[in-house]
Image (tube, rainbow, N blue to C red):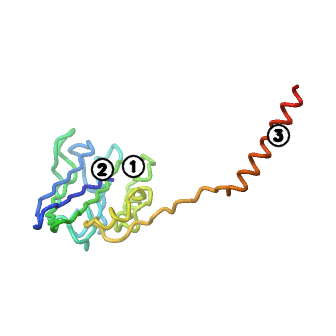
Amino acid sequence: RSLVTFANPSGSPITVAVEVANNFGSDSGTTIVGTSSGDTSYTLADSWVTTWDGSSEINTTAFATPGAVVTPDSYTQTVFNCAGPQGMGATFTLTVPAFATQSLVFFGGIAEIDGTGDTDTANAMANAMMFESLSTVDPSLTSDLSPAQVAQIVNYVGEPVLIEDVPVPTLSQWALLVLMVLMGLFGFGAFRRRA
């Protein structure tokens, strides 16, 4: 997961073009094997895409969800060169209001996201469905985000599931005092037996 944050300290809106690209190192054999709309054509109506070169692990990319405040202007399958220029890229136009902060979050992974590392396209697409909303993304990918950071994300719909902190059991001061006395008595008794 990548979280890219843009802060505007000025008194006027600032508009920027944001380009993001993934090149998983697959080659000219790379093809789209699935999208969120169920076909093999990655369009602005899709929230995720899976690609594969037919031999190595499947790649999953998710740039945004349709219906979000900010969505991509375009997608491309030609990005920077890494064993070939094949990959997935998106271009956004982001307008950050005066004295505001906005964030874009992106997800990408090799294999079927669940770490099995095989080349099961059906498994890859089933796991990619989590990227159709922040509320369905695996909490391990978003649990480190604060509520303020989540509120700044503009390219996804939904709220992530938060993993609740489990409180650490503690003892009251009286219980600690009793425990210390008992440990002291035990230690004193053990010391006296040796002497």
Which residue is painted at 35% across and 48% down in the image? 110
- Name above or below for residue 80 compared with residue 19: above
Q: In this orientation, which residue lies closer to the viewer: 17 or 41?
A: 17
Instruction: Work out which residue is located at the far top of the displayed protein and give it.
Output: 195
Residues at circles 1 and 2 in contact by the CB criterion of under 8 Å: yes
Q: In this orientation, which residue lies closer to the viewer: 193 or 169?
A: 193
Please tell me the numbered disc located at residue 178.
none
SS of the residue under disc 3: helix
Which residue is painted at 52% across and 60% down in the image? 165
Three-letter amino acid code at disc 3?
A: Phe
Q: Is residue 139 found left or right of 41 in the rendered image?
A: right
Q: Is residue 42 found left or right of 36 in the rendered image?
A: left
Q: Which residue is mark 1?
A: 119
- Name above or below for residue 21 compared with residue 42: above
Three-letter amino acid code at disc 2?
A: Trp
Q: Which residue is mark 3?
A: 186
Which residue is painted at 41% across and 56% down in the image? 144
Residues at circles 3 and 1 in contact by the CB criterion of under 8 Å: no
Q: Residues within 10 Å of mark 3 (few under 14, many from 20)?
A: few
Residue 45 found in image quarter: bottom left
Q: Residues within 10 Å of mark 2 (few under 14, many from 20)?
A: many
Marks 1 and 2, the one that precedes in the sequence: 2
Distance Cα–Cα, label 1 vs label 2: 8 Å
Marks 2 and 3, the one that precedes in the sequence: 2
SS of the residue under disc 2: strand
Q: Is residue 98 found left or right of 36 in the rendered image?
A: left
Q: Which residue is mark 2?
A: 52
